[in-house]
């Protein structure tokens, strides 16, 4: 099904857009608006929505085999969590928890469905994320191991360095606090899970009494040296056409780094065991950054303006990026999904597709 060059989400008051996913087979688009999941057709007409999320629903991706939307859900009480609580007036539990949530997308058929009561959402508890969030970091003595602020990016693709047609895994990325006074937070952190975790551990979520059903640990933990960013990876997306993992961030503030808006992880390169910089002798599996913009350096990337609030790669060389819009007077938020193609002669790597 041909995807239009532009798709409008409509305006919603639950928070700014955090991620998008496109169901090409059915002609549907999904938008994460922080505490609301919205489903539209390609003309932007609303088909359904899921409300009653107490925390931050972030980047989302479709698992076509299970016909489910997977995404990150943070239930926490830092500045981000407090902002959501203040806006919604709802704080069901004081406990901080982090989940991989999944929605049965074919059951989303009406507006204002309830994430808890309507039987369409399950959640997998990610205990090791919570442990890193709560821990003091031995490398700096500061709070939050690796600078972990929770999770955000969620994507499906082959294991790094594996064949293009190998089984897909769920890659979930940490949020990382933008603290310029420490050196142990200059990596992005990627956790790898088999998609079957949603079958094995997924349970309905009562946010007032959050469950702890989840794997003991991820299958693998990877590190990507980008320099510190502001709240880490916002969105990640695997592109089968280029075998790159598009990795969009809010720019960092450490002056010794270029502070790009987007990085590209080389999906063809196997991870390497290395001593991690600024981590006091800790070793980890480090991923390789590609350099499609040709900028060189330790942390290549580009300044492309979009991606941090949602992106989708069709696997055939077309890319769809969320352009967020805010109506300050009405205190509402929208997204226009715009079609792009890759052009490595452009410093931004992507150029819009004209009608």
Image (cartoon, rainbow, N blue to C red):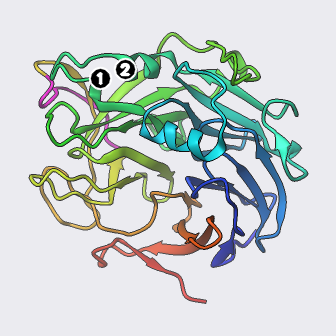
Q: Which residue is mark 1?
A: 145
| Badge 1: residue crowd in 10 Å (few <14, some 14–19, many ≥20) | many
Q: Main secondary structure of the magenta part?
A: loop
Residue 153 in sight here:
no
| Rendering quarter of residue 312 | bottom right
State the residue at coordinates (72%, 73%).
2
x, y (%) of residue 338? 57, 74
Q: Which residue is mark 2?
A: 132
> In the drawing, does residue 157 fall left or right of residue 347?
right
Give the position of the N terminus as an image quadrant.
bottom right
> In the drawing, does residue 255 fall left or right of residue 285?
left
Foreground of the two, 88 or 300: 88
Residue 142 in the image: above or below residue 39 = above
Is the Cβ of the residue at disc 1 closer than 8 Å to that at disc 2?
yes
Q: Which stretch did the figure color magenta? A: 268-279
State the residue at coordinates (51%, 37%).
81
x, y (%) of residue 355? 61, 89
Secondary structure state at the residue bearing disc 1: helix
| Rendering quarter of residue 12 | bottom right
> Farthest bottom residue?
355
Foreground of the two, 79 or 315: 79
Residue 354 in the image: above or below residue 160 = below
């Amino acid at each position: 099904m041909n995807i239009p060059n532009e798709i409008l989400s409509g305006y919603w008051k639950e928070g700014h857009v955090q991620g998008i996913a496109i169901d090409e087979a059915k002609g549907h688009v999904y938008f994460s608006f922080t505490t609301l999941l919205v489903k539209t057709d390609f003309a932007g007409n609303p088909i359904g929505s899921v409300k009653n999320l107490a925390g931050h629903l972030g980047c989302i991706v479709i698992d076509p085999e299970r016909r489910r939307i997977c995404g990150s859900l943070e239930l926490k009480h830092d500045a981000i969590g407090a902002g959501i609580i203040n806006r919604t007036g709802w704080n069901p539990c004081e406990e901080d928890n982090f989940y991989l949530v999944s929605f049965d997308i074919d059951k989303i058929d009406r507006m204002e469905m309830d994430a808890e009561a309507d039987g369409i959402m399950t959640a997998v508890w990610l205990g090791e994320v919570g442990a890193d969030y709560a821990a003091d970091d031995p490398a700096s003595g500061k709070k939050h191991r690796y600078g972990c602020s929770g999770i955000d990016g969620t994507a499906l693709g082959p294991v790094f360095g594996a064949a293009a047609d190998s089984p897909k895994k769920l890659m979930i990325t940490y949020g990382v606090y933008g603290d310029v006074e420490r050196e142990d937070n200059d990596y992005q952190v990627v956790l790898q899970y088999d998609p079957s975790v949603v079958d094995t551990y997924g349970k309905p979520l009562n946010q007032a009494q959050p469950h702890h059903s989840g794997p003991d640990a991820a299958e693998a933990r990877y590190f990507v040296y980008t320099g510190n960013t502001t709240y880490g990876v916002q969105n990640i997306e695997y592109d089968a056409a280029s075998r790159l993992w598009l990795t969009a961030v809010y720019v960092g503030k450490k002056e010794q780094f270029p502070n790009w808006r987007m990085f590209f992880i080389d999906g063809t390169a196997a991870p390497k065991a290395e001593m991690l910089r600024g981590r006091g002798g800790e070793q980890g599996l480090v991923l390789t950054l590609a350099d499609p913009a040709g900028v060189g350096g330790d942390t290549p990337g580009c300044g492309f303006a979009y991606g941090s609030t949602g992106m989708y790669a069709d696997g055939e060389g077309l890319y769809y990026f969320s352009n967020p819009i805010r109506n300050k007077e009405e205190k509402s938020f929208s997204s226009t999904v715009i079609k792009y193609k890759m052009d490595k002669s452009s410093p931004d790597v992507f150029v819009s597709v004209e009608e």
